[in-house]
Image (cartoon, helix red, strand yellow):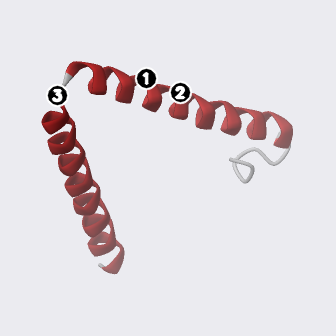
Amino acid sequence: MIKSAPRAVEAASSLWVAVFNLSIGLGALVGGVIVDTLALQGVLWLGGACALLAALAIWTARNDARH
């Protein structure tokens, strides 16, 4: 973000920190709702599915970078 706004480093940095903290808060909120809503087995299946999707995204990105 600093490279995109070299004349407004402070504003870009504060925006970056705000977005980062917002993502942490939203992740905690969504995770809490999921844990409260699903049974333990459902939470584990959802976690496994998220891990597989992350692995697929990394694999796809690596293949795209090679070509």
- Quarter holding residue 21: top right
- Label of residue 39 in the image: 3
* Mark nearer the N terminus (3 vs 1): 1
The C terminus, quarter of image:
bottom left
* Mark nearer the N terminus (2 vs 3): 2
- Quarter holding residue 22: top right
Label 1: few (<14), some or many (≥20) within 10 Å?
Answer: few
Label 3: few (<14), some or many (≥20) within 10 Å?
Answer: few
Drawn side of residue 9 relative to residue 51, left or right? right
Drawn side of residue 59 relative to residue 19, left or right? left
At x 76% / y 34%, what residue is drawn?
A: 14
Disc 1 marks which residue?
29
Provide residue 20's location: percent of width, then percent of height: 60, 37
At x 31% / y 64%, what residue is drawn?
A: 58
At x 32% / y 72%, what residue is drawn?
A: 62
Q: How far apart are marks 2 and 3 (CA)?
A: 22 Å
Q: Which amino acid does label 1 sit on?
A: Leu
- Label of residue 25 in the image: 2
Provide residue 37's location: percent of width, then percent of height: 22, 19
Q: 37 or 25: which is nearer to us?
A: 37
User: Where 37 falls versus 50 (above or below)?
Assistant: above
Q: What residue type is labelled 2?
A: Gly
Drawn side of residue 20 relative to residue 44, left or right? right
